[in-house]
């Protein structure tokens, strides 16, 4: 509304001003004519001095008129929206002046409007003055007009009364009206100067000139800088990865420790001759104590007493004592290429004789040796070496994936084996923190391992044997508490006999019990005399810590031998190859460890985030004869969900057994073994061509090879065979489930039937001895695993690998399964074998009663 009123006032003022100007021009013309006549009449009477004075006055008059005309032109450039004199003042001025020709006034007004309109449009388009700024200036001009309106009226009256005087007082109102135009002109001048300056400074910048094409000067410089950075990074990478590797695995581990100047040495080392010690080890009076003296800070003394590091009033475990130094690894890979050797006496500075090193007391729970499944206890303590200018160890540097010509391979080796004797396999087994190097790579894994090995030792038994394992937890206690259905309890552990048909109660396969650090438990279980021969495995199953312990390397194979004469001759006499495929996902394992607060697990030096090892090796080679049938015992150790999808192109694959149970329609040709997480498969393999290399591929591309010799065996084709099944594997495809014993089990999210694993003893389903139990399983993305009793597929989606009638203990998909609870009562655990889900609550417990009835879903 204010803007509309101001526009109206402006238009009225403009019309009045046009009339006033016409009157003033008429008065000026009459005045000049009178003055000219008077000057001519008096010219002859003037002297020379008077003529000069008159000439000077004429010149002054012309100068003043010129200034007035310029001032008039400036007023004509005033904006259209500048406020004009009030209508009252304009009316008074118009009434006191002669009448002007209306046509001249209208023509002048029309011309002025067109000029002002075009000028305003150009100014708004070029300078982008906001409406808010224009309104503010109009408001300011209006206030000034109100204050000066009286002055203008007085000036107009004075001009009328003194019409003979050709000079006018200073037009203050004109200055006010010109204020907005002057401000706009100043802004335009500044903008123009700024553009000229930018144009001058960027005169060589042709980045926006389309005629220059893509390769402008600016872009060329950017490309050159990028190329220099890429080449420099590549050279730095080559330098770092091809420089002599003088750091030990313990140096790599030191990056995770809080004491940067010390390191625990557990391998045979040599001190670099260039190292200048700045710390010295002094023996104390006690053989189990030693002092470390640091000259730069003489007040800092460290004492070691009975395996404890004492710094002032604080006691720290000896495992936290670390050193950073230039050392070279001199211990050779042994057995499977592991560098996990016990601590040996290092070469020390002459000032520190090895005989004066501190010694530790014997372990409170010594483990037994080889036949004992554990690494022998060291006879000497970890050694403390001097350090010079400690540096932080390098973190894992990614390397490019190996090419076909650069892949390092070695013959596939098998883990240490422990075989039962006289119907008993009795041994000691511990879980302990160890650091191992993966052969054929620079991968270094620090984790919790069974028997200190990766993979752990293989157990070989027969049906009816007794399995006794004195299991001890030799992990250090990090003080991590257990939180139900969360990643936690990482230092607790236990054992699960995956797939064995044994009791789920103590002292057998009860995974609800755990062994704390420093404690032990004597597992004991008896295999039934009719236990079917097959491939099984063993791993920790502490709820909350299963994924990190199993995924980090804690696993062992269990083989149940077949009785002589029970298998086809080509199977019984075939070469046997144990194939423990272990899947690593570095980021996921590190994430689990980080959430749990674990400081033990780490992986260094691997080239990819995901990789698969076979028997603890990277890209091993299986040596066989051309045309030879050999038995491939596959165990798929995967803490996540993906199937193994094992395939061997151009080699024949005949399925023999799954999850430790022989199939009915052997041989069954397959082209891909879709082994789920935790599952097993026994496959007869034959590669035809001599002196040829075949790739074993799967979930992560190729992870092993088969190389045939020049000998061509040309073995015969396999003959059909069907095994004799024990009572617990009776065919149930045509047998209905017992009354009330058909229950649904759905694995979704991180729960079973919509419920997470209860913290107190509670049972998902209930059955009884002698019942035929059916479970309608929905586990599309979650491998369903059942303890104690294997189950038979009776309906569901089938293919060449999952066939109706096959037996499993792990399955993925939608199936109806049946089993007969013929002998073992008590706990029966079921869970997702995607172990990160199991740790978070995707587990449940069923109960098998000696007698009673079936109940479904926590009823």
Image (cartoon, helix red, strand yellow):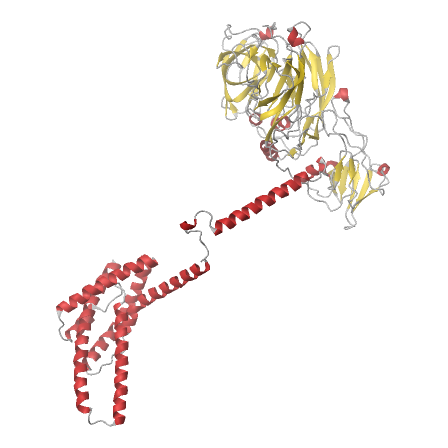
Drawn side of residue 828 relative to residue 291, left or right: left
The vertical placement of 275 against 582, above or below, is below
Position of 375 with respect to 141 (left or right) is: right
Residue 715 at x, y percent in the picture: 64, 9
Query: Can residue 853 be spotted in the picture?
Result: no
Q: Position of residue 537 (x, y in %)?
A: 64, 18
- Residue 583 in view (yes/no): yes
Above or below residue 392? Residue 411 is above
Residue occupying the point 63% across, 29% down: 405
Nearer-the-camera pick, 140 or 492: 140
Quadrant assignment for the N terminus: bottom left
Q: Position of residue 556 (x, y in %)?
A: 67, 21
Residue located at (67% from left, 9% from top)? 572
Quadrant in the picture for residue 390: top right
Quarter of the figure with residue 761: top right
Is residue 542 shown left or right of residue 187?
Answer: right
Residue at 31% in and 66% down: 181
Q: Nearer the viewer, residue 159 or 211?
A: 211
Nearest the eye: 695 or 393: 695
Q: Position of residue 253 (x, y in %)?
A: 69, 37
Counting every numbered tag in the picture gives: 0
């Amino acid at each position: 509304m204010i803007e509309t009123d101001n526009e109206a006032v402006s238009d009225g003022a403009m019309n009045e001003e046009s009339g006033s100007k016409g009157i003033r021009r008429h008065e000026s013309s009459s005045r000049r004519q009178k003055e000219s006549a008077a000057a001519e009449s008096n010219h002859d009477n003037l002297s020379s001095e008077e003529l000069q004075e008159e000439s000077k006055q004429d010149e002054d008059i012309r100068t003043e008129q010129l200034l007035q005309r310029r001032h008039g032109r400036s007023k004509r450039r005033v904006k259209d929206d500048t406020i004009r004199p009030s209508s009252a003042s304009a009316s008074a001025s118009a009434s006191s002046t002669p009448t002007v020709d209306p046509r001249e006034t209208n023509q002048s007004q029309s011309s002025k409007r067109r000029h002002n309109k075009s000028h305003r449009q150009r100014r708004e388009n070029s300078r982008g003055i906001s409406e808010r700024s224009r309104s503010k200036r109009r408001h300011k001009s209006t206030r000034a007009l109100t204050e000066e309106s009286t002055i203008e009226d007085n000036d107009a009256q004075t001009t009328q009364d003194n019409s003979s005087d050709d000079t006018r007082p200073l037009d203050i109102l004109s200055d006010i009206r010109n204020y907005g135009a002057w401000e706009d002109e100043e802004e335009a001048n500044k903008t123009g100067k700024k553009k000229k300056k930018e144009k001058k400074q960027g005169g060589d910048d042709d980045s926006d000139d389309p005629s220059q094409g893509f390769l402008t000067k600016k872009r060329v410089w950017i490309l050159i800088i990028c190329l220099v950075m890429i080449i420099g990074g590549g050279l730095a990478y080559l330098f770092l990865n091809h420089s002599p590797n003088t750091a030990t695995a313990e140096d790599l581990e030191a990056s995770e420790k809080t004491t940067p100047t010390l390191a625990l040495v557990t391998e045979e080392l040599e001190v670099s001759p260039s190292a200048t010690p700045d710390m010295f080890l002094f023996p104390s009076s006690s053989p189990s104590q030693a002092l470390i003296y640091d000259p730069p800070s003489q007040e800092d003394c460290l004492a070691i007493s009975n395996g404890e590091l004492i710094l002032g009033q604080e006691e720290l475990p000896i495992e936290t004592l670390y050193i950073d130094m230039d050392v070279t690894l001199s211990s050779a890979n042994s057995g499977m290429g592991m560098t996990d050797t016990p601590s040996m006496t290092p070469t020390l500075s002459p000032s520190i004789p090895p005989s004066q090193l501190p010694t530790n007391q014997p372990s409170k729970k010594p483990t037994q040796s080889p036949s004992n499944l554990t690494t022998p206890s060291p006879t000497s303590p970890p050694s403390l070496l001097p350090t010079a200018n400690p540096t932080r160890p390098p973190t894992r540097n990614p390397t490019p994936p190996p090419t076909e010509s650069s892949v390092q391979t070695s013959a596939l080796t098998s883990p240490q084996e422990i075989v039962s004797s006289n119907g008993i396999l009795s041994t000691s087994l511990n879980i302990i923190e160890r650091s191992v190097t993966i052969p054929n790579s620079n991968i270094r894994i620090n984790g919790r391992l069974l028997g200190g090995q990766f993979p752990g030792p293989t157990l070989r038994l027969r049906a009816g044997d007794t399995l006794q394992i004195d299991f001890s937890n030799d992990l250090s206690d990090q003080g991590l508490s257990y939180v139900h259905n969360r990643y936690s309890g990482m230092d607790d552990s236990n054992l699960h006999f995956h797939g064995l048909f044994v009791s789920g109660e103590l002292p057998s396969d009860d995974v609800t019990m755990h062994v704390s650090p420093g404690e032990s438990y004597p597992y004991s279980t008896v295999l039934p005399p009719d236990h079917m021969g097959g491939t099984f495995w063993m791993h920790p199953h502490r709820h909350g810590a299963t994924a990190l312990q199993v995924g980090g390397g804690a696993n062992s194979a269990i083989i149940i031998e077949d009785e002589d004469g029970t298998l086809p001759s080509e199977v019984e006499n075939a070469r046997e190859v144990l194939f423990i495929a272990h899947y690593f996902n570095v980021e996921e394992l590190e994430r689990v460890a980080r959430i749990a607060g674990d400081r033990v697990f780490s992986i260094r030096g691997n080239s990819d985030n995901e990789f698969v090892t076979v028997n603890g090796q990277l890209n091993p080679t299986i040596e066989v004869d051309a045309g030879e049938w050999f038995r491939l015992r596959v165990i798929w150790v995967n803490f996540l969900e993906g199937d193994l999808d094992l395939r061997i192109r151009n080699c024949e694959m005949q399925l023999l057994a799954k999850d430790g149970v022989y199939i009915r329609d052997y041989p069954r040709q397959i082209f891909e073994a879709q082994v789920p997480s935790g599952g097993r498969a026994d496959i007869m393999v034959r590669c035809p061509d001599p002196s040829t290399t075949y790739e074993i591929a799967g979930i992560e591309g190729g992870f092993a090879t088969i190389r045939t010799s020049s000998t061509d065996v040309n073995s015969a084709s396999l003959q059909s065979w069907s095994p004799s099944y024990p009572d617990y594997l009776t065919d149930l495809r045509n047998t209905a489930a017992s009354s009330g014993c058909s229950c649904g089990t759905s694995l979704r999210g991180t729960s079973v039937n919509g419920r997470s694993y209860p913290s107190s003893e509670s049972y998902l389903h209930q059955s009884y001895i002698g019942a035929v139990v059916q479970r309608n399983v929905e586990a599309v993305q979650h491998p369903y695993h059942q303890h104690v009793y294997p189950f038979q597929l009776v309906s569901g989606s089938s293919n060449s690998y999952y066939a109706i009638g096959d037996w499993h203990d792990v399955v993925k998909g939608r199936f109806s399964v049946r089993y007969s609870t013929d002998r073992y009562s008590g706990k029966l655990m079921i869970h997702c074998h995607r172990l990160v889900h199991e740790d978070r609550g995707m587990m449940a417990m069923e109960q098998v009663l000696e007698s009673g009835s079936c109940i479904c879903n926590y009823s």
